[in-house]
Image (cartoon, rainbow, N blue to C red):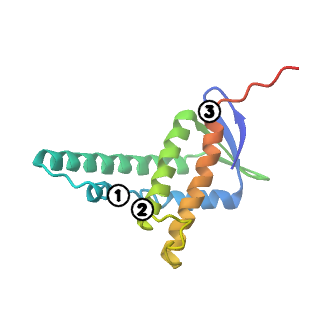
Amino acid sequence: MKLLKREETHCSFLIGRREREMLFSLLQRYPVMVAAHFRTRNPPKTDEAKQNQELLEEALAEQQKENRKHLEQMLAENGRFIENDLGFTFRLSYFEIEWMLQVLNDIRIGSWIQLGEPDLSSPNAPPLNEQTVLLAWAMEIAALFQHSLLQAAQPAEPAESE
């Protein structure tokens, strides 16, 4: 995915056909993050803390449901992706970029959690099988798309005057 143009309200991107297929396939995995994961790390000790945890989990589930709905609408939006000889061009507002970064982060971190939160540089990395390969793929591809979006969201460097 390549930034074509940065404007005041949005950015325009070019994405190849296969890259678009990978993005769509990746986004189909959303949501990956499970709210209960945080409970198992720091289980609530009081009734009030348990109620707060339940409210937090409900809010996260509702947010993920809304994000999933918005994601499906955005990807199906007529004219969102315009085909050309190089692939597709598409536009995202800065708000949509921020939102897409959050969705991709859910996929990346949720996949890492499902892998058992490994230190992938360690010799004790998870064994290779179909599930772990898909989770590792999701982590890496999500990170690549996040990198492209983060670069686009950064203010342009002022040109040096001679």
Mark drawn on residue 113: 2
Residue ID at (27%, 50%): 57
Q: Nearer the viewer, mark 2 or mark 1?
A: 2
Quick one: which residue is furthest to the top in this view?
Answer: 161
At horizontal 58% and vertical 54% (from top left) the residue drawn is: 143
Q: According to the image, label 3 marks what residue?
A: 10
In the picture, measured across the screen, residue 99 lies left or right of residue 79, that is left
**In terms of sequence position, does the residue under pointer 2 or pointer 1 come before the other?**
1
- Discs 3/1, front: 1
Q: Secondary structure at mark 3?
A: strand
Give the mark nearest the N terminus, 3 or 2.
3
Q: Earlier in the sequence, mark 3 or mark 1?
A: 3
In what element is the residue under mark 1? loop
Q: Nearer the viewer, residue 118 or 146?
A: 118
- For the residue pair 2 and 85, the one nearer the viewer reads as 2
What amino acid is at disc 3? His
Query: Residue sitting at 49 percent across and 41 percent down?
Result: 99
Q: Give the residue at mark 1.
A: 34
Image quadrant in which you'd find residue 34: bottom left
Q: Is residue 140 above or below residue 68?
A: below
29 sits left or right of 89 in the view: left
Q: Mark 3 and mark 1: span between their CA atoms?
A: 31 Å
